[in-house]
Amino acid sequence: MKKKYLYPIIILALIGLSILAYNMKNNKEEIPYPAFLKLAEEGEVVEVNLSDSPQFKAELKDGRTIYTDNPRTEDFKKELLLYGINVKEEGIGINELVIFLVLVSGLVYLLFHFKSNMGKEAEREMSNLSQIEDLDYKPNITFDHVAGNQEAKEALMEMVDFIQNPDIYNKYGARLPRGVLLYGPPGTGKTLLAKALAGEAGVPIYPVSGSDFVQIYAGLGASRIRSLFKKAKEAGKSVIFIDEIDALGKKRKGSQATGSEEGDRTLNALLAEMSGFKENEGIIVIAATNRIDVLDEALLRPGRFDRQIEVQLPDIKAREQILRLHAKNKPVSQEVDFRKLAEETVYFSGAQLENLLNEAAMIAVKEKEQLITEEHINKAYLKVLVGDEKKDRSSLTHKDREITAYHEAGHALVAKLVSQDIRVTKVSIIPSTKGMGGFSLNISPNSMYKSKKDIINDIKIALGGRAAEELVFGEDHITTGASSDLQKATEMVLSLIGIYGMDKESGLLNYKVLLSMDAKLDNITERAREILDKMYDETKNILLASREKLDVLAKALLDKEVLEEIEIDKLVSQ
Ligand code: ADP
Ligand code: ZN
């Protein structure tokens, strides 16, 4: 039963009991005092229960129990005894006592309940507020405690100097970043990175969670934000860490001026505090989220969280490093092959890897073994994965990875083959916020304008993923993985013919104008389709002609999960 039903039931029960007791009293046989005296004289009364209460109870010879008024005279007991009646004395009537006890215990229970439940809200408010005060500590965590995440680490390392020596930057009039947003899947080390930053800089960190600021009491979230910043400012150089910032930083409902919702108010307070920093105080605000897409744009503007750093799931190399890091303080057997373990833990987050070794250690303890062995890790593996089918060591995952590898290799290879100017800086098959895998291009434009050729290349690059899938696995096995690619390709081809007037056949008409005039767009749609189909065929041909390179790239991806520019260039130019 839910707790919240508990107390209406108790209250009802109490009322019921009281009524019952009251009725019991009323149902009993009462006689006038003179009548009682008569009975006593006649020797009809066997026993009397004397107390201080207004009435007393008497047992009659015929077995009846009667009540009558208590005269409360001094000699009453003596009188009764003289009649030969058995007199019993009670402090309080047993009935009253029971009712009294029930009521008291009920009250006590309710009091406790109120205190622990209703008061919980208020208590939490209070304790949270004081938590903000208490939770400033200087973490002794450094970047050495964070494995992988190279880019995020480097970006944060830069900030150590900002925090430590703001004066130097002030002298040069440089505006320091105030906020850094770390985004990526849970358990990838965002909190760890924030602590490492504070640890390296040797300043206190104020860790809070966005959900702490979501309050039922109006204005409390906003005032808590202010008190948090006040504390940090008093401490001087420091790091404020706001986990789950999406809880308070969701896109605002109202416009900035009219946003009246409590959440909006809290968010506005945060924005105001961040803009209210004196330029360079050595305070950095780090926020973390796994939902960057739901954040209010105002949070991402200059002067707020204008640095956004993606924290990704670890690739195979990083997984090995994380495993080794967390194995350091554990007696792990020499036989354990961390490289192999890293291979087997595709899609694991840092937290899950840590958890894996921890579970293995627990099993080793339970089995009273000296060392943590491969067998313990295998058992732990099953435990960590319970309910997480996606990370199963099944063939499905294997196939998924292979398809992703070919898909991403397809994008990368097409990019390298269609133009000399395009640099592919990274390809990965690690799932990210953007999808199963990803690739990064660095297109250095020679001019301000994009040419028709550039747009066509971009379209082909976007289609390269699906084209590779079809080429390698056949038409029936193409996947949904290309949906955002196709969206991009569609947008680009529509711009090409309907905005930039780059297609002879469609002419120079702007389709948005046509759209606004309710004109038929069938021709444009048909033409866009034609062009896309043609480009898709061309893309497939490009890949077909370089099929070996595609295989080499995909294999390398399966092996390393992430390829950097140098490796990509080397593989493609072979
Ligand atoms: P997030 O804030 O991204 O959800 P955390 O920083 O809370 O993740 O990670 C939880 C734990 O997982 C860390 O305390 C650490 O033990 C482990 N962990 C996660 N990522 C890493 C990493 N890159 N290197 C070492 N340990 C990690
Ligand atoms: Zn793609």
Image (cartoon, grey):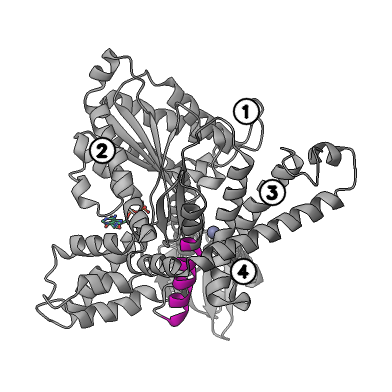
Q: Which mark is residue 256?
A: 1
First in sequence: mark 4 vs mark 2: 4
Residue where numbered disc 2 is placed: 157
Residue where numbered disc 4 is placed: 20
Residue where numbered disc 3 is placed: 493
CA gap between label 4 and label 2 equals: 74 Å
Range of the magenta residues?
394-409
**Magenta stretch encompasses residue 398:** yes
Three-letter amino acid code of the residue under disc 4: Leu
**Magenta stretch encompasses residue 455:** no
Q: Nearer the viewer, residue 547 or 137?
A: 547
Instruction: Say few, some or many: other residues with alpha carbon within 10 Å of mark 1 (under 14 / 14 to 19 / 20 or more).
Output: few
Q: Secondary structure at mark 4?
A: helix
Query: Is the Cβ of the residue at disc 2 closer than 8 Å to that at disc 1?
Result: no
Observer able to see residue 41: no
Residue 68: x and y in percent read: 58, 66
Observer able to see residue 249: yes
CA gap between label 2 and label 1 equals: 34 Å
Three-letter amino acid code of the residue under disc 2: Met
Q: Nearer the viewer, residue 414 or 323?
A: 414
Query: Is the Cβ of the residue at disc 1 closer than 8 Å to that at disc 3?
Result: no
Q: Can you tell me which quadrant of the image ligand 1 is in?
A: bottom left
Seen in the picture, residue 30 relative to 448 is either above or below; the reply is below
Residue 167: x and y in percent read: 24, 17
Q: Nearer the viewer, residue 69 or 151?
A: 151
